Amino acid sequence: MALLAYVLVLLMLCSALAVQLSAPRLGEGIARISVAASAVTFALAVVLFAWRLGTGDAQLFGIGLGLFTLYVDALSTLMAVLVSAVGLVVHVFSVRYMQDDPAYTRFFVLLDAIIGVILLMVLAGDLLTLLLGWHLLGVCLYFLLNHDMRRPAANRYAFWTLFTHRVGDLPLLAAIALIYHAYGTLSLPAVFEAVAAAPDKTTLLGLPLAETLGLLVLLAAFAKSAQFPLHTWLPYTMDGPTPVSALMHAGIVNAGGFLINRFAPLFVETQSVLLLAFAVGLITTIMGSLMMLMQSDIKKALGYSTMGQMGYMVMECGLGAFSLAIYHLIAHGVFKATLFLGSGAIIANARKDPNIPEGEIYKFMVERKVPHPPLSWVVFAAITITVPLIIVFGAHQLVDEGFLHHQGALILLLFGWITGAQTLFFVYKIGGERPFTVLLYVALSFTAVILTYVVVGHAFDALLFPDPAFREALYRAASVNATTFALVLVLLMVLISAGWLVVFRSEAAQQPLTRRFRELHLRLYALLSRELYVADFYSRLAEQLLAASRRLNAWLRWV
């Protein structure tokens, strides 16, 4: 299996070389080489994953140098299947989509190269190999985003992405240096064993080593996964080719979730670092979701949606639900890649024929006619608040009773409750003559989604972290004082319930809150439309740095 693992990594890199060398002779036929290599890579990834399930033990393979080792475990093989599957779909899609592009060959060379680099990163068994894949990923992405070099916007934002990713390289490089200084090894299994053996070890300036390393790993993950305030690169990458936007979800923008999970044995020994992941992920989730709703460009809306989902993924890690974050990573990656690949056809069809079926949703969205259902808003509010709570609580109790003993699980239940309540509120908002029928369909759909989420999440727990004690330790590392947590949770539930009641009453009285607080609403809209002025701050900072460099050059007489 050692040979299979190395072939899996090298196949796409060899394909990139073969495409480049064969281009003068084959022309557009080079796409067949690329697609064939991608298909074989996917098949090998599935075989490797099946072999890992059969053996049950993680194994480290090397070539005798101590470097370029590959670590074959459940996480790496599962990620390899995701990367190769999405890569195969993008390859097939790109054959015709990029057909008239003058840089057809270069695109497939870069496409093969970046998939090979991602596979190297997820299968890396030592820290230098991991850093190599992590760094080259940003470099390959830069060239793919800047594929059309004639577009100034593509050039600018590709460089912006490259710079942000290089910022994310620095914390990981610092973490690797501290690890080697402390333990004298770069092998991932050996590092994790050393951390578990001496969790209280200190580093430079007497800082706790585990906490410091955990913080550095999180910072690296934040930059790659577009977390606030390092999020600005992601929404502006939409100037790149559509296949690249889809490929972003094959271990590129979601690489941060993989990195945090790879260092899960390190985070077990931390005390408060995961709280930072929760806070940053929560802010990113809210910002991405709000700014998604404000976009008129479908690809940019999908980009902000990805930002929000990546925030939710990091937040799940911050709550101790590491395996749930991987499930989220895979499900969202497949779903959002499909949306990006289909976005162009949807836009083209909508321009020719909107084909919007007239109905209650059409009247609400287009005509703004809101025939409220013949049902008291008090009853509807009670249903909206209680039914989702019963569904999310019952689903988790049905699958795993012990799940509710974790603080992180209760926070996830809170978000599930809010999501379900928002869905039911929309049923009330659009109105209709058969509210109970629509409510029943929505409740059944929500139940199916929650049950699937819980069952699959529990299966991922058993797959990625089969040791129950280890899973408990992850949740403990993400916990806070029990009394404080209980008080905050109860307060949040009361405030959210009260908020829903106010919203329902305002809608029933035909006085939406946005109308009553119009000035505040406009100010908030303006603030969010400028992304809290984070991008403006970065642009201003860049201008100041360039001006300072010009003054320095003139003073030193370099120019």
Image (cartoon, grey):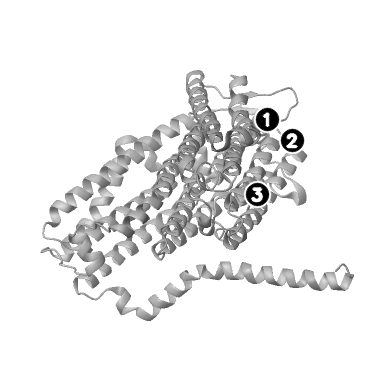
Residue located beneath label 3 in the image: 216
User: How many neighbours does mark 3 have within 10 angstroms: few (below 14), some (14-19), or many (20 or more)?
Assistant: many
> In which quadrant will I find the C terminus?
bottom right
Does the CB distance between marks 1 and 2 fall below 8 Å?
yes
Which residue is label 2 attached to?
183
Q: Name the amino acid, label 3.
A: Leu
Q: CA distance from mark 3 to mark 1?
A: 19 Å
Nearest the eye: 128 or 270: 128
Q: Along the polypeptide, which appears first: circle 3 or circle 1? A: 1
353 relative to 110 in the view: left or right: left
Horizontal side of residue 441 vs 150, given as left or right: left
In the displayed structure image, the side of residue 381 where residue 216 appears, left or right: right
Distance from the alpha carbon under mark 3 to that under mark 2: 17 Å
Looking at the image, residue 78 lies above or below residue 56: below
Q: Earlier in the sequence, mark 1 or mark 2?
A: 2
In the image, is residue 494 above or below residue 469? below
Q: Residue furthest right?
A: 557
Q: Amino acid at mark 2?
A: Tyr
**Helix, strand or loop under label 1:** helix
Question: In the rendering, which numbered label is found on residue 266?
Answer: none
Task: Evaluate whether residue 557 shows in this view.
Answer: yes
Q: Earlier in the sequence, mark 3 or mark 2?
A: 2
**Residue that badge 1 annotates:** 190
CB-based contact (under 8 Å), mark 3 and mark 1: no
| Residue toward you, 191 or 94 | 94
Q: In the rendering, at what x and y percent does residue 163 appear? A: 66, 56
Q: Report x, y in % for residue 377.
A: 17, 65
